[in-house]
Image: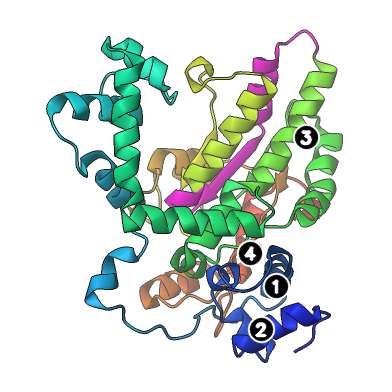
Amino acid sequence: MLLGLSTRANNALDRMNVVTVRDLLQVPLTQINRLRGVGNKTRREIAATFNDLRLRFPDVENIGPAKPEPKEEEQETQVASVDLIAEQLRSAGVTGEAEKRILYAFLGFDDVNQPGSYTWPSQTDTASRLEITRARVSQVIVRARERWKKNPSVTALRDAVDMILQTYGGAMTVGDLYQDLSESARKRYALLQTPDFIEEFILDRTLMPAIGEFGYTKVRMIDPTCGSGHFLLGGFHRLYRLWARNEPGLNSREHAQRALEGVYGVDLNPNVVAIARFRLLVAALKVCEARRLGDAPGFRIHLAVGDSLLHGPRIGSERDRTAYLDGMDPLQHVYETEDAMELRRILGQQYHAVVGNPPYITVRDSALNAEYRKRFGSCHRQYSLAVPFMERLSIWLSTPPDMLG
């Protein structure tokens, strides 16, 4: 397998017994990022080739090589869930209520912080709130850090994040990091961060013509498979620039909120929706120069967790749409993680531009497969999920099909 790779990259793949494109795509990206005896430049070259091939061959399952079962004493070295790590951080080796109180306050696990304030307290903040000296807080935190360094789960997560960041030159988006850290989530939800040049290309041909026809003050764009919010973030920045340039009488916070009113997103995966919400919030804070989350305005962000194919009005009459908005969801079912009211609001209206990178995977769950087939005539034989999404998009679009991307 050549693919225009350098000699060092080909030698590294040879050591991994990677001979064909399929072999490469079946290797977990985290394994590529952890190659021993390989420089960061070579790792980045292989990772970039992997991502390019994943776009071209999305149906190749990334199963990775078979791994031996870890020995009993090695079980704890695996990366644990974030919730489990959080529990380990606040409980491991804490001696006494006074030390526990300081540690909980510093980590944000207690009720000392004011409700609604999402700032991460410094050691000085913690000392002031607890009315103790900063030296005492520092003493507790230093001792805790020494204990945390001995925790294999924390160390494994830190090393995994560091290795991935180094592969990307030391900086990457939250969406990229989530995609690379969680191999199981990447396979289940077909996670694949849309490259910047593709996002820009699509927005140039969808959102911008819609703005030209309807105006930046009225335009609405939806990404029904928003993932970590790549398209939404790009749409927000474009709309913000227009508001800031054309409405100098409004302040930056109003500009940011008006821009947020133009972007909507839905995704089945609650984790990526949380990331998308965070990225939009950070972008809005940045443009209005808010330095602390506690100083942030109550920005309204239009995101919901749910299945865009199953929820929302069926393709058909206006009566069906009106009934859906009144609460008559034909599915009559939502999962605990899904936002029923927000889904009804977001999926029940039409948009001037529809964008997205729908999952190019087949549906393995038999009940879900049958439900999709019942709702969409395009679901024939072994279909990709992108097919019903293309059929579904027409009900959201209130403009000509050329504003679909």
Which residue is at 54% across, 74% downward? 28
Give me the C-alpha separation between circle 3 and circle 4: 28 Å
**Residue 261 percent across, percent down from the top left:** 63, 29
Q: Residues within 10 Å of mark 4 (few under 14, many from 20)?
A: some
Q: Examine the structure image and report whether residue 264 is included in the region drawn in magenta.
A: yes
- Using the rendered image of the protein, determine whether residue 43 is visible from the camera's viewpoint: yes
Task: Tell me which segment is drawn in magenta.
Answer: 248-272
Please, what is the three-letter code of the amino acid marked with disc 3?
A: Arg
Instruction: Name the mark on residue 391.
Output: 4
Q: Disc 3 or 4, which lies upstream in sequence?
A: 3
Which residue is at 26% across, 47% downward? 88
Nearest the eye: 331 or 242 = 242
Which residue is at 70% across, 16% downward? 252
Callouts 3 and 2 close, C-beta under 8 Å: no
In the rendered image, which residue does mark 3 sit on? 238
In the rendered image, which residue does mark 1 sit on? 46
Give me the C-alpha separation between circle 2 and circle 4: 41 Å
Q: Secondary structure at mark 1?
A: helix
Give me the C-alpha separation between circle 3 and circle 1: 33 Å
In the rendered image, which residue does mark 2 sit on? 13
Please, what is the three-letter code of the amino acid marked with disc 2?
A: Leu
